[in-house]
Amino acid sequence: MAEEHSGTTNLHNYRVARGERVRRAFAALSKRCPGCSSLIPYEKRRYDHCSQSCATTAYQRSNPQPTKRSACGFCGEPCSRPGNIYCSTRCTGLASAAKTSKTLETAMATTGVLVGSVNVVKRFLLKQRGHSCSICGLSRWNFMGNDVLIPLVLDHENGNSDDWRVKNLRLVCGICDMLLPTYKGKNRGHGRFSRRQRYTDGKSH
Ligand SMILES: [Zn+2]
Ligand SMILES: [Zn+2]
Ligand SMILES: [Zn+2]
């Protein structure tokens, strides 16, 4: 029993001595805060700065916030806040659309396949070819006494909706679309993959 007690005391003494050594070694370093040059206490020996506020000041100094308002990356007007790239959400959108359009232009000139969502590709083709039906040529329509732009749909000429080659794509008006041999049910077996799969499985819709 006595031996065990003395063993515990020895271990305790050893730990205290080791703690003292580490403390003395740290004190010998006289580690100072680069912000306010005060000595860093032993408890904060793992930190570079004496306090959160000194650390924050140092961080802000090395990562300065932009102070100048730059010109909008799209329209060139000055941005409302420093650090902004575009002056408005409108310009952000237009810049993104311009980038998409550039990508599609490149695709058209190289692979000839337009990759993108239906709306994006449709908008691109409208810009390229103008707003008119590529079959009947109509661009406007009298709707209930109003002269309106004729609604156009994106049509895959060969009926294969997975075929996005630019020469297979056209914009057609609703009437022409309905008269096409590839319209809805008439396109049986050539439409979307999921639909083709359903027909193969013997379903009628
Ligand atoms: Zn400090
Ligand atoms: Zn702008
Ligand atoms: Zn038409």
Image: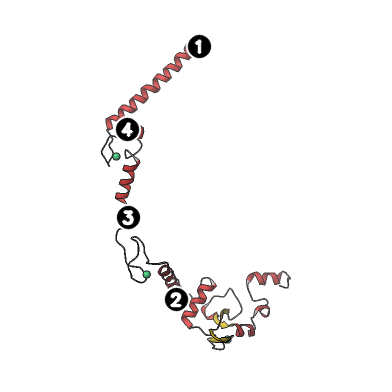
Compare marks 4 and 3 and give the one earlier in the sequence: 4
Q: Residues within 10 Å of mark 2 (few under 14, many from 20)?
A: some
Residue 180 in which image quadrant: bottom right
Instruction: Compute the Cα span from label 4 to label 1.
Output: 40 Å
Numbered label attached to residue 143: none
Compare marks 4 and 1 and give the one earlier in the sequence: 1
Nearer the camera: disc 4 or disc 1: 4
Residue 114 appears in the picture as rendered: no
Element class at badge 1? loop
Q: Position of residue 163 (x, y in %)?
A: 57, 75
Coloration mode: secondary structure
In-image side of 184 versus 10 (left or right): right
Instruction: Compute the Cα span from label 2 to label 4.
Output: 63 Å
- The residue depicted at 53 percent of the width and 71 percent of the height is 117
Q: Is mark 1 within 8 Å of ligand 1?
A: no
Element class at badge 3? loop
Do tag 1 and tag 2 residues touch (Cβ < 8 Å)? no
Q: Residues within 10 Å of mark 4 (few under 14, many from 20)?
A: some
Compare marks 1 and 3 and give the one earlier in the sequence: 1
Instruction: Compute the Cα span from label 1 to label 2.
Output: 89 Å
Q: Which residue is mark 4?
A: 41
Nearer the camera: disc 2 or disc 3: 3
Q: Which residue is mark 1?
A: 1
Compare marks 2 and 4 and give the one earlier in the sequence: 4
Numbered label attached to residue 65: 3
Numbered label attached to residue 105: 2
Element class at badge 2? helix
Nearer the camera: disc 1 or disc 3: 3
Q: Amino acid at mark 4?
A: Pro
